[in-house]
Amino acid sequence: MNDNQLYPIGDVARRTGLSVSAIRFYADAGVVEPTGHSEGGYRRYDVHAIARLELVRTLRELGASLDDIRGLLADETPLHDLATTHLAIVESQLRQLRARRAVLRTIVNQPTATEQVTLMHDLVSMSDDDRERLLDQFWDEVTDDLTVHPAFTEHLRGMRPALPEDPTTEQLQAWIELAGLVRDPAFRDAVRRFFHDSFASPRAVDLTSPSRLARLAEHQRIEAEASEAQRSGLSPDSPRAREIAERLLASVADLAADYLGEPLDEHARDELRRTMTDPDPTSTAHQHADRAVSAFTGVLGTYLSLTATITGTPDQDQMDTGVSEEWLAAALAAPGGGD
């Protein structure tokens, strides 16, 4: 295009993608005035005016107002400031669209009563404070009068998701489901009964003290280490596998001693080693452990799975370390393992 050439409004419309009436409107509104006029009084535009009109079209498509655009073209508003303002607007609109999409997908994917639609939209549109308040109310109710150490109550209250600043539709859908779950009186009652039944022991406060929680956390760390060793292909016959398995055995013994309130004697330790080296799924201890895991996942499995989706963490069984009994048994039974 020639910098000195003036173009009629029809050519300008074709070059900018604007309609002739829109170009006239921007001229009359003082946004982009024509460079000149023909002898017959028709508007003419040079390449610089055409470039400004292209910018106007782009900014209008992005939601900028005429006043914003006038300020920008008059050098009263820096482009960076205008872009920053409208980026925030666009991102807000995107969040609202994701929220609407999550509600619509939930309606499409599961039976939904008409009166639930408004509730779903309210749930997905909650502020961070509103979400925290809902979860606080849930944990306040299910732990009310629970006779445990205060540190354990705080530990339970920490079992909550934090919705990312820019969540995906799947995360929003998971939040809708989780919010509905924690509002459900039946679910609240089931969780409350589970915790009150699980910690009915007179020693519950002692068993849930910070030192016990720290020991449990260390045990879970060793379990995770064993699980990673197995996934990496480490042979259970290797010295490293035996060392991990022995630490896990010792940790189980310490946890058992905590529960009983006294150290395990030599006979009890030998029996523990035997049960871990030769696990029997039909044994009373094994079945008791299976029932405990089933009770936990039966009550809180969905809550934890939704929490994992919302936070974007792997959806793993919270009571399953992933390390197999067979791998641990082989590592403990390998030559050089144990006493």
Image (cartoon, grey):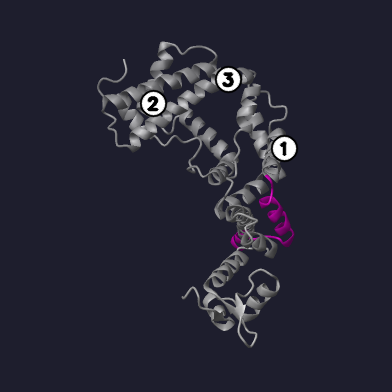
Residue carrying label 3: 210
Q: Quadrant of residue 40?
A: bottom right
Name the mark nearer the viewer: 2 or 1.
1
Going by the numbered disc 3, the residue's amino acid type is Pro
Going by the numbered disc 2, the residue's amino acid type is Met
CA separation in Å, label 1 and label 3: 24 Å
Q: Which residues are magenta?
A: 105-127
CA separation in Å, label 2 and label 1: 41 Å
Q: Earlier in the sequence, mark 2 or mark 1?
A: 1
Residue pushed farthest right? Answer: 115
Rate crowding at label 2 as few (under 14), some (14 to 19) or many (20 or more) other CA atoms within 10 Å. many
Asked if 47 appears above or below 240 in the picture, the reply is: below
Kindly identify the residue that appears in the image at 62 percent across and 31 percent down: 156
Q: Earlier in the sequence, mark 1 or mark 3?
A: 1
- Most foreground residue, 275 or 252: 252
Residue carrying label 1: 137
Evaluate if marks 2 and 3 touch, with contact meaning CB atoms under 8 Å apart.
Answer: no
- Most foreground residue, 247 or 55: 55
Going by the numbered disc 1, the residue's amino acid type is Gln
Residue carrying label 2: 276
Q: Position of residue 250 (x, y in %)?
A: 41, 19
Secondary structure of the residue carrying numbered label 2: helix
